[in-house]
Structures are given as C-alpha cells and as structure tokens.
Amino acid sequence: MENNNKPRVFSGVQPTGNIHLGNYIGALKQFVDLQNDTDCFYCIVDMHSITVPQDPKQLKETTLDVAALYLAVGLDPKKATIFVQSTVPQHAELSWILTCNSYTGELSRMTQFKDKSKGSESAPTGLFTYPLLMAADILLYDAKFVPVGNDQKQHIELTRDLAIRFNNKYGDTFVVPDYKGIEVGARIMALDDPTKKMSKSAENIHSRISLLDEPSKVKKSIMKSTTDSDGIIRFDVDEKPGISNLLTIYSVFTGKKIDDIVAEYEGSGYGQFKKDLVEIVNGGLEPIQSKYKEIRNSEELIKILKDGTEKASAAAEKTMKRVKEKVGFISL
Ligand code: AMP
Ligand code: TRP
C-alpha cells in the first residue's frame, strides 16, 4: 500500500483559472513541502470542474495551466506523481460504488453543496455527488494524508465515514485518511472583504492575488486591501481580520513568525507594511511565473502528465481489483 515505507498523500485542484494565494498557501505549497517525505499523488481534477458549466476549449487550456503551475511552484515529477483525473477512469468507477454506499442525507449536509446550490431544485446532480468523486480520488490511492485548505475538511470527514462504513460492511479494504491542515494559512481571506474566503470566482479581481498576476496588479490589490481604522498592526482574526490576513500572507512568504513580524512593525502604519508586503509577494511570485512560462507550452509537460497517468493507473487498478472482489463483481 505504501511505497518505500513513505506514507501516501493525495490531493487535487480544479482546473479553473485564477489559481490564487489561497490555493497556493492552503494547498500547493503544502504539496511541495510534503514531496520529499511522502509518496504523493497530485491530481488536476477536471471531472470535478464539470459539475458547473465549462467551456470545453478553455477547460483543456486551464487543465494544462494548472499542471504547469504544479511544476512552477516546485513540484518535482521525480518525487510526485502528477496527473489529470479524467485520464484514469477508475476514479469514476469507484465513485459509483461509493455512491451506492452513501446516503442522500449525508450529502445534503455538505456546506459546499448548500452554498453552491442555494437550495435550488435545479441544482446540478454533479454538485450533489461531488464529494463522492472526491472520496473516490482519495481512497483509490490508499492515501493517509490529504493536504487541503480548511474549506475541504468536511469532505475529508465524509471520506473517512465512507471508508469506515465500507470496511465494516465488506471487510478491510480502504485506508482511512486524515485531513492534513496547516497552522498558518488554511483559510486565506478575500482582500476586499476579509470575512469571506479568497475565491477563484469572486467578481472583484482585487479580492484575490492570482499566481500569474502582474506586479502592478499585485501592488494595486494589496494597497487597496480592506483593513481597519485603528492603524495598529496586530494579529486578531475576529477584531482585525484584514490585517491578520495580510500578516498570514507575509508570514508564509518570508517564513517569519507572525509575532516577530508584529514586533518588527511596532509603531509603523499599514502603508509601510503593505508596501513591504507588495515587494515580498512579487518577489515570491517572480520565480513561479518564470518557471511557468518556461514549461507551459513544452513537450516536457505532456510527457510528465503521460507518465503520471501511467503511475496513477497502476495504483488505482490495484485498489479497484480489491474493491470489485469485495462487492462481488466477476473478473473474467
Ligand atoms: P479549488 O480551487 O476549490 O480546487 O481548491 C484547491 C485547493 O485550494 C483546496 O485544497 C482548497 O481547500 C484550497 N483553497 C481554496 N481556497 C482557499 C483559501 N481561500 N484559503 C486556503 N486554501 C484554499
Ligand atoms: N474538492 C477539492 C476542492 O474543490 C478538489 C479535490 C477533488 C480534492 N478531489 C480531491 C482535494 C481529493 C483533495 C483530495 O478544492
């Protein structure tokens, strides 16, 4: 189940545009941090993205965009298996089997479904069954850890419930995964409204910093970001969500502790702090953007994805054999 005794890790990102600092801090950066000590599988989950309408031409492009970003942030294909979900059909296959072992009640309780469907009777079915496909992604690879932002925690809990239920019903089959959160940055907030999470789809482009934003756009978004009127740099998520969010971003990009940053800026105003943060973020994005440009249209990218499909398929097929045997599907 494990390679070289290293624990298995699985995670995925949807191939939609505007991969932002929340995605980077909550997910991608963790992917990179984990690649030396784990046997990791990182997926571009295109099947999840079609739960809402997508332009087919654009979907192909954003799939390659996200694959290129995986490499640009520092994932090494020699260490991590990088692949596209739809190229490994076992994801859909296991998803169906899990669907038949789940309840509509538990899916209706998923807050992401409730938010996205807003109680409408005409909500797409795929939005409702989305967490079952996500559970299939994770369980197919015997993943022990799932590095994701805090908005996905409920989906991981459902995955655990499904794995435990299946194991009880059919005998030991799945590894029960754990949510792998981080202390700082599991939920990066919107720059224009720090009570909401930073999202790919918000209308205001200054609500987020995308990894491919130009330096001048980054500057504008940070300088315009909503803070408060008391002018004191202090970390307090409830009372001062705006400045706390900026401190989090500062801390992740510099590796400095939040307390140390607060001490460093004692007595200075938000203006100086924001200016410094602009430099820090642009400095951090620069190497990502140049690596991205180098690899995005290369043959190498396609080769890496093909190799990823091959490795992922082998692992997925092993699990499916086990699962089919348990549920009573014949093999000929
Ligand atoms: P998605 O864009 O929904 O495919 O999300 C990809 C990854 O980014 C998931 O692990 C999310 O939990 C994480 N993520 C998305 N938004 C944020 C945010 N604002 N703060 C921290 N992590 C996030
Ligand atoms: N649902 C996740 C999101 O929107 C993406 C995702 C799909 C995922 N399958 C996964 C994350 C498996 C971790 C593991 O962010």
Image (cartoon, rainbow, N blue to C red):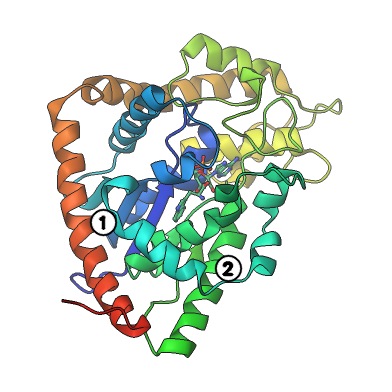
Q: Comparing marks 1 and 2, which lies closer to the viewer?
A: 2
Q: Which mark is residue 187?
A: none
Circle 1: element type: loop
**Quadrant position of the C terminus in the picture:** bottom left
Location of residue 151 in the rendering, given as x and y in whole percent from the top left corner: 61, 51
Q: Residues within 10 Å of mark 1 (few under 14, many from 20)?
A: some
Location of residue 307 in the rendering, given as x and y in whole percent from the top left corner: 15, 47
Residue carrying label 2: 157
Location of residue 163 in the rendering, given as x and y in whole percent from the top left corner: 47, 76
For residue 281, above or below residue 84: above
Q: Is residue 206 left or right of residue 140?
A: right
Calculate the distance from the C-alpha at mark 1 to the C-alpha at mark 2.
26 Å
User: Which residue does the image show at 37% across and 23% down from the upper left?
Assistant: 57
**Quadrant position of the N terminus in the picture:** bottom left
Q: Are marks 1 and 2 in contact (CB under 8 Å)?
A: no
> In which quarter of the view is residue 246 placed?
top right
Visible in this render: residue 31?
yes
Q: Earlier in the sequence, mark 1 or mark 2?
A: 1
Q: Residues within 10 Å of mark 2 (few under 14, many from 20)?
A: some
Instruction: Tell me the kind of residue under disc 1.
Output: Asn
User: Which residue does the image show at 54% across and 64% down from the upper left?
Assistant: 156
Residue carrying label 1: 36
> In which quarter of the view is residue 11 placed?
bottom left
Instruction: Tell me the kind of residue under disc 2.
Output: Glu
Circle 2: element type: helix
User: Which residue does the image show at 40% across and 41% down from the upper left?
Assistant: 46
Location of residue 237 in the rendering, given as x and y in whole percent from the top left corner: 75, 45
